[in-house]
Image (cartoon, rainbow, N blue to C red):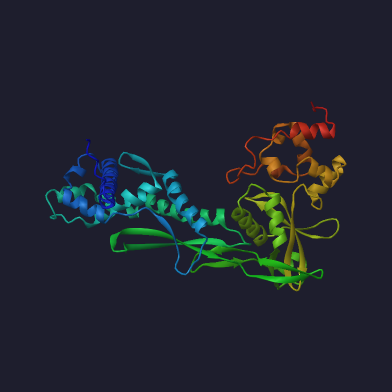
Amino acid sequence: MSRKKKKISSEALQKIERARQRNEFIARLHKFCDQVAGPDVFSLIPEKELEMIYLMRCQPIRVREAKGQAIDPEMMKEFKTMAPLMFKSWQLPFEIGSLKTISAYDFFTVGFTLIIYANRIKEGGYDNAFIVKNKLAHIATLEHNPSFSHLWNQHAQMANLFTMLYSDLGYGCYVFKTEMRIEVNGILGLNIYLEAYCIKPEDMPVTIENRQRQVFRVGWPLAHPAPHFEYVRMPSAALDKLPGLFLDVYIQSHALKRFFERMNGVPSGLLHYSLFHSLKNPKVFRNKDGTLLFEFSLCGKKSGYLVASVVEGMIIIRTFLFLTNAGTPEGDRLRGNLGLKTKDVIYLQIDKLSAFLESDIAENPEVKEIFLAAGCRTLFEIDKAFYYPQSEKERHLAGFIAAYLGLKGAA
């Protein structure tokens, strides 16, 4: 009879995994050291020192919930998954030794570990310590190198990117503060955390046209000195009213929904940051009915208008109009030029951002000219970097529009 194989205990498996992680880290450190200090340095560091380096190593930057916060577990899972992926994908200029670039992930693990070690080597600590110390001297002073500041700036940018991608004025906005700890749960080593906070803007019910509406105060979340909102306060002179006063700005929950529907494909955080920025630097218009309009720009490109009213000393954003919607100067011009009605615009599917970012309209000169003539050039200039396509394939709208309008170039 064949003997049954003995099952490996969980304790033994954990020990094997720890050994694998240790060997992997030392291999990465060895490679980094060779690149920045030359191939004859790492072999001079004794095993005992390597063990100490590993125990005191710098951990990857991690995201965790700040004390007292109760953030949606799915959102925390998203942050924890995205952080290492972003750090590994960001290749940054380094220009030290033979290393020309480095990922943010490698810098904050093996790079930072070697910097700390280079600063604490004692010349007589072990055989060849003097040589190792001299060979790593330029690494010990790396914190004064512009590359060092640049890498930390990338760390701050990732926190800002999370805020930009995932925040929503109607549900909650996320900000992150950096915390460093030398010990976590009894384990030594440099631990860098992005601590997540979820904060919400002021909100309240307001009676408009005899109906109660929920409104949210327009602002943008900031992490420092403590998590808070910077709110928009618009000068009364911007509205041609008695100067010297300031009006708080709120947006209806209904307007947030229309905003997301008509600017489809853009993350809510980027939309709401652009909302904040547009209202901090307002361009004020009135449509032909005298309705108050604020121009909305996405990353500097005009995309529509925010329809507003002054209610009880506050500015209330009532809805959002995409650039081709009725009630905007461009939308009304488009209708006037072509004799279109609102139902035609909806039928042609040109009442949302996705029509211009994931269709062939821009590739058809005759159809594109229709929108250029109406003043919609900026819709073709929007950067797609933060746009999430709403369909898997490019939509063929140009021929459909040309045929509907009876253009010469229609198939």
Residue at image position (72%, 46%) is 352
Vertical side of 146 occupied by 243: above or below: below
Residue 236 in percent (x, y) is at: 73, 69
Residue 306 in percent (x, y) is at: 73, 57
Q: For the view shown, which residue lies furthest in the right direction?
A: 339
Nearest the viewer among 384 and 85 is 85
**What is the number of callouts on the image?**
0
Q: Dividing the image into 4 quarters, which one contains the C terminus?
A: top right
Nearest the viewer among 331 and 201 is 201
Nearest the viewer among 77 and 53 is 77
Residue 261 in percent (x, y) is at: 70, 51
Residue 20 left/right relative to 71:
left
Q: Quadrant of residue 346?
A: top right
Q: Dividing the image into 4 quarters, which one contains the N terminus?
A: top left
Residue 240 left/right relative to 31:
right
Residue at image position (58%, 46%) is 386
Q: Is residue 311 visible from the viewing direction of this image?
A: yes
Q: Quadrant of residue 394?
A: top right
Residue at image position (81%, 50%) is 326
Q: For the view shown, which residue lies furthest in the top direction?
A: 411
